[in-house]
Structures are given as structure tokens and as C-alpha cells.
Amino acid sequence: MNSATFRFYAELNDFLQPKRKYTSFAISFLAGQTVKHLIESCGVPHTEVDLILVNGISVNFSTPFSDGDRVSVYPIFETIDISEVTNLRPGSLRETKFVLDCHLGRLAVYLRLLGFNVFYRNDFSDDELAEISEKDKRICLTRDRGLLKRNQIEHGYLVRTLDSREQLVEVIKRFQLQKQIKPFTRCTGCNGFLQPVEKETISKHLLPGTREHFHEFSCCEDCERIYWRGTHYKRLKKIVDFAIDETSSNHNNTE
């Protein structure tokens, strides 16, 4: 039986047993076992990992271990460009298209509210989520750690918090999406793009009170849902403002 010494950094420690957090520890393994296998045996989904160093050299998930190896495992780097040293993926992990599991319906709405491309249905199976993530190159957001261990899912993230607004902030910070926020540009119901529409063309679909008091409207290109700045807009605007404020550089600098 061979042995390698592991050290996990930053938020990857969220997945470890208490005695393994923020310290080096040894793992025994059989000849031929790979980096991915041993990392996930510690409870860390491979989708959470952005850089692996074995004896100081960057390796990919399929690299086999040797007896006595020292392994450092890092999460996604938020402020450092590691594209020249990492060998895990041919492209950036920070895509802005998502697919969400059935437990994150409200988060799906909030992400669409901020203009992000979100594929969501409340009846997706794990097999469907993995297939969509792989084929459409979407980041899989989930509360299911086991789902993220599937080989099909290369881009994924385990959402930690339970509150939907806090989840929104968590995802924006995790993938550094602050500059890509475009509020009220997507349909929160179907993910289609919103386009301005003349009141006269949709007047017959409006209630009398709405027709009388509102004059600016948008319509979804796909499902033709109509939007205007009524009381619901004020509520949604508060969510947008909260997300922008909580993820702004000035807010982060004061924490």
C-alpha cells in the first residue's frame, strides 16, 4: 500500500472531516489510483478544484500517484490568473451559463433577474442535469454533493447557503460575475430575452388599471410574457440592489 500527503486550501476545507481541515494528512492508496479518485474520496467534488500540484508541479485529474507524493489542492482562484500554470482544463471555468437542480428554483429566478442564462426545470433528474451541463457547457449549481462527483460534470458548484438571496450573492462572488450583471434583460419565467414593446401592440392583453397607469413595457421573445414597472418591479428591484450592493468592491473592502 502506497501513501501520499494531501493539503486542501481555502473553502475546499468545507468538504473535509474536521480532523483533516486546514492541515496536511496522509492517504493510503493502491497503485494506479488517480488524482480525481483520491480527491473525491476525501469528499471534495472535482468541480470545486481549479489547481492541483503534485510535488510542486501542476497535474490533471487523470494523473496517477506515486508513493510519497505531496499533493496541494486549490479551489477556484478569484483574483489570480492561473491560466499559465494549471493543466486541469483547456478553457476557463468561469462560464456564465447555468443549469440548476430542482432545489434551487428561486435562485434560478434571481439569476435570470440579473440577466444570466439559466436552464431550470423542477423535474430534472440527476442524469439530465449531468447531460445538460456536459453538452451545453453549463455550470451545474446544486445542493447535492454527489451530483458534482459525476465524471460528466466538469463545471459545477455546491451552493452552501440556504437563503435564496444569499445564494445569489454567493454565486456572483464565486464566479466573479459583478461586471456581467444586466438586470431586467431576461424573462424570469422562461429565460428568454426581453425586448421593449409598444403599448399599442399589447394593449388588448393588459388589465384596465395597468393599461391606464403604465406606459413602458417589455415582452419576452420566447414566451411573450409582458413586463412593466408595477409593484412587482419595486420588489424585484430591491433584490437587484441587494445583490449589487453585497457584491460590490466597496462593500467587500469594508468587511
Image: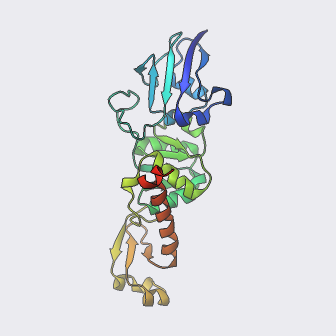
Say above or below: 233 vs 81: below
Q: Position of residue 20 (x, y in %)?
A: 63, 26
Would you say residue 248 is visible in this rendering?
no
Quadrant where the N terminus is found in the figure: top right
Which residue is farthest front? 254
Q: Position of residue 113 (x, y in %)?
A: 46, 63
Say above or below: 115 vs 37: below
Name the residue located 55 percent from the left edge and 21 percent from the top edge.
Answer: 6
Choose top left, top right, bottom left or bottom right for residue 158. top right
Choose top left, top right, bottom left or bottom right for residue 95. top left
Name the residue located 42 percent from the left edge and 18 percent from the top edge.
Answer: 56
Q: Position of residue 137 (x, y in %)?
A: 41, 43
Name the residue located 54 percent from the left edge and 57 percent from the top edge.
Answer: 107
Would you say residue 138 is visible in this rendering?
yes
Which residue is farthest right? 18
Identify the colour scheme used. rainbow
Q: How many marks?
A: 0
Q: Position of residue 234 (x, y in %)?
A: 49, 74
Say above or below: 254 vs 200: above
- Position of 185 compared to 106: left or right? left
Q: Nearer the viewer, residue 156 or 123?
A: 156
Q: Nearer the viewer, residue 110 or 77?
A: 77
Name the residue located 50 percent from the left edge and 60 percent from the top edge.
Answer: 110
